């Protein structure tokens, strides 16, 4: 058999190679196709859809925030995004472009040339011109759109997409509680931040089909998935109580030129619900990125330009900070209610033990002498008297009765060793002693000064919660500001249940402490917080700061007052706290924070429906209301005045009363004088109001008598010589009718720490 030639052999090999190449090549293609159609199919399908569709988020309507009575405090109002569709213009229609650009520029306050340039993006159906325009602007746009359609046959070019804007019903109200939202609608502070997830809802979507050039196709090719509205928050805050508290905190800040803000917090002692939380100087919730204090802004404006941005940022951070939750402070003498409770609970006051005060005290061998605020000393006193005297030497003795271990145990038991857990952001914890080698971190000097509330730090809300525990039969409650959450249709989906953390002291000890705090408000150092007719209990505090807000040594003070009402069955606790009042005016808790406490309670307690029960002494001094004596015979009018326990003063020669002063129903003191005019000439008489400020009770009565005036008393005035006139409701030198009633506000004249 003949052998194959070289050519045939070469052809055979070439064929084999070709077959192999084709086999491998097609096999690879087939395998690749199989891989793409099976393993990669889902991924490729998603990528294809992504290329064909454009997804635009539709904002959900943020839930509203209500006060405890259902009043809206924060809500999202409808606004609109303005969308232009340049692809709807005819290619060479220059006139329509000019009409649309000019009209939109005028309505939206935008640059006409910029809008005109964007009309030439003819492949786009979705050009956002302006976001979040109000309803007035929206209506203008609708009218303009209607006009250009009717007059110029221009349609489909202007579209409006609903959006939302956060609105607070009161510009400067409960700022530290409510907080605010950012430009993206997310909560940045307060309840808005703490409950952002509940308030936000679920965003919707607008899915738009894109053409081969990745441009949106006309609106008939889009799909809208509706957003789900956020849930609503109902607070424990009462709008009326909050307004009362903010009013008097601001008043105190101004009167005493308080440098570093102040706050007042009111709690329902039986539930832990916060009824009011006034943290001033606050900010406008609708304009949170503007420095609220004009004085602070003026200081910033005077700085070099390169320093202004940092200073403004620091000022904004400070005004957003919730002082009652995020700041720690040295509590001072208000803490004495805790030390006294511990001593009573440990049975260390048996046989009515007495504590000696000679104006100063050496707490242990080798220690320096620590002075009492009263350098003359208080002598021998019971625990209850020591609290009413706010005697530091007595409380140092109590501290050493307890010892460091027990003192720390009660510090923990009253909730000071951990945050309260209040549902507000940024809560700080206490700052305890840190003495190396000391027992429980305390040296002996720490125990001495800690017993009267110095040299450790707590938050205001921790102090209020501890006071509320004493008022609540010894039960420590969890404080909270959100009562319940509802969905967008009003159904309750979550409720905050009152939570008892633990029993701190017994009911009997708590009862004893409430009685002692009441004694302090009636006849002790807390009289400036007393409200006639209500069983008020309280304790003042004047603490040395030691270190200022910048970490530098300080000789400034914090003035506070913490109390409860009514003491026979406590319902509310209130803490008023002011950081760095002007020392040249007054810095004592009794003078600065006490009147603020009293003013808030005097309005809040009647509003809450708490009944007045007057003591016999108060009833004896109770004011009465003038009757109506005009058109009466003089003799009958005099008799009617006297029956009202008032004194008549007849002026003129007539036989009938033609006018009177004070007017009918005016509240005035018993034995006050009512002038009865009997002719026109007698009505012309006027008297000048004297300056009552800083007068004692007897001096005020004398001035009123010689100037033919009546006075009505507000505040502490029962013990003459121990109180003074702080303010009067009619300014000095004003001319008024004889026996006009001048309301004088008295404060206790003491500097109790």
Image (spheres, rainbow, N blue to C red):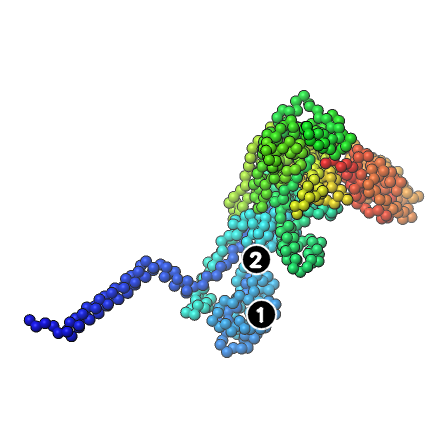
**Residue at horizontal 55%, vertical 73%?**
116
Asked which secondary structure carries label 2, the reply is loop
Residue nearest the observer in this picture, 95 or 737: 95
Question: Which residue is farthest right?
Answer: 653
Give the number of marks: 2
Q: Is residue 639 visible?
A: yes
- Label 1 neighbour load within 10 Å: few <14, some 14-19, many 20+: many
Q: Position of residue 382 (x, y in %)?
A: 71, 26
Q: Is residue 337 visible?
A: no
Per the rendering, the mark at residue 183 is 2
Task: Give the residue at mark 1.
Answer: 104
In-image side of 629 versus 612 (left or right): right
Q: Quadrant of residue 544?
A: top right
In-image side of 643 versus 48 (left or right): right
Give the alpha-carbon distance from disc 1 to disc 2, as whole Å. 23 Å
Q: Quadrant of residue 209?
A: bottom left
Q: Position of residue 408 (x, y in %)?
A: 60, 32
Quarter of the image for the C terminus: give it.
top right
């Amino acid at each position: 058999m003949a052998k194959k030639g070289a050519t045939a052999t070469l052809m055979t090999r070439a064929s084999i190679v070709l077959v192999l190449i084709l086999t491998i090549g097609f096999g690879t293609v087939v395998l690749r196709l199989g891989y793409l159609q099976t393993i990669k199919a889902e991924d490729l399908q998603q990528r294809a859809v992504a290329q064909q569709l454009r997804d635009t988020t539709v904002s959900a309507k943020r839930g509203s925030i209500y006060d405890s009575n259902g009043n809206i405090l924060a809500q999202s109002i409808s606004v609109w995004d303005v969308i232009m569709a340049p692809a709807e213009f005819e290619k060479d229609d220059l006139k329509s472009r000019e009409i649309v650009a000019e009209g939109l520029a005028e309505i939206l306050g935008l640059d006409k040339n910029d809008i005109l340039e964007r009309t030439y993006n003819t492949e786009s159906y979705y050009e956002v011109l302006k976001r979040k325009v109000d309803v007035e602007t929206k209506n203008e746009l609708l009218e303009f759109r209607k006009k250009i359609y009717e007059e110029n046959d221009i349609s489909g070019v202007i579209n409006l997409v609903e959006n939302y804007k956060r609105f607070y019903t009161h510009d400067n109200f409960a700022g530290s509680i409510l907080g605010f939202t950012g430009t993206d609608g997310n909560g940045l502070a307060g309840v808005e931040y703490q409950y952002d997830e509940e308030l936000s809802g679920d965003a919707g979507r607008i899915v738009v089909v894109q053409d081969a050039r990745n441009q949106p196709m006309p609106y008939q090719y889009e799909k809208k998935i509706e957003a789900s509205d956020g849930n609503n928050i109902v607070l424990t805050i009462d709008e009326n109580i909050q307004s009362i508290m903010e009013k008097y905190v601001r008043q105190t800040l101004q009167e005493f030129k308080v440098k570093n803000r102040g706050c007042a917090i009111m709690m329902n002692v039986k539930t832990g619900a916060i009824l009011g939380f006034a943290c001033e100087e606050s900010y406008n919730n609708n304009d949170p990125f503007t420095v609220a204090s004009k004085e602070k802004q003026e200081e910033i404006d005077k700085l070099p330009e390169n320093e202004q941005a940092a200073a403004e940022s620091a000022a904004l951070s400070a005004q957003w900070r919730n002082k009652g939750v995020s700041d720690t402070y040295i509590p001072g003498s208000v803490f004495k209610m805790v030390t006294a409770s511990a001593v009573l609970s440990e049975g260390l006051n048996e046989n009515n033990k007495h504590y000696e005060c000679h104006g100063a005290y050496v707490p242990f061998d080798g220690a320096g002498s620590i002075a009492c605020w009263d350098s003359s000393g208080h002598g021998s006193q019971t625990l209850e008297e020591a609290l009413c005297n706010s005697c530091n030497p007595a409380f140092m003795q109590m501290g050493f009765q307890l010892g460091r271990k027990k003192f720390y145990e009660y510090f923990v038991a009253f909730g000071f060793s951990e945050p309260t857990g209040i549902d507000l952001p940024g809560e700080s914890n206490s700052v305890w002693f840190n003495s190396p080698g000391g027992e429980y971190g305390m040296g002996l000097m720490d125990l001495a000064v800690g017993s009267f509330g110095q040299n450790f730090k707590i938050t205001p809300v921790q102090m209020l919660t501890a006071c509320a525990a004493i008022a609540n039969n010894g039960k420590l409650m969890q404080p909270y500001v959100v009562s319940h959450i509802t969905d967008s249709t009003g159904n309750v989906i979550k409720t905050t249940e009152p939570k008892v953390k633990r029993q701190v002291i017994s009911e009997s000890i708590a009862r004893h402490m409430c009685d002692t705090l009441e004694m302090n408000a009636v006849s002790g150092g807390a009289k400036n917080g007393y409200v006639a007719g209500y069983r008020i209990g309280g304790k003042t505090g004047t603490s040395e700061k030691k270190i200022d807000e910048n970490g530098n040594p300080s000789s400034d003070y914090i003035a506070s007052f913490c109390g409860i009402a009514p003491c026979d069955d406590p319902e509310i606790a209130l803490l008023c706290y002011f950081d760095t009042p002007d020392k040249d005016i007054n810095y004592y808790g009794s003078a600065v924070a006490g009147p603020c406490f009293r003013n808030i309670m005097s309005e809040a307690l009647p509003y809450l429906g708490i009944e007045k029960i007057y003591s016999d002494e108060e009833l004896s001094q109770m004011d009465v209301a003038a009757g109506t004596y005009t058109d009466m015979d003089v003799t009958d009018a005099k008799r009617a005045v006297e029956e009202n326990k008032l004194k008549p003063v007849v002026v003129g020669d007539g036989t009938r009363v033609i006018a009177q002063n004070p007017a009918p129903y005016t509240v005035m003191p018993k034995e006050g004088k009512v002038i009865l005019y009997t002719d026109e000439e007698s009505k012309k008489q006027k008297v000048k109001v004297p300056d009552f400020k800083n007068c004692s009770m007897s001096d005020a009565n004398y001035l009123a008598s010689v100037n033919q005036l009546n006075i009505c008393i507000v505040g502490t005035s029962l013990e003459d010589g121990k109180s003074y006139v702080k303010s009067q409701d009619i300014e000095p030198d004003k001319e008024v009718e004889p026996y006009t009633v001048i309301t004088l506000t008295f404060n206790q004249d003491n500097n109790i720490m």
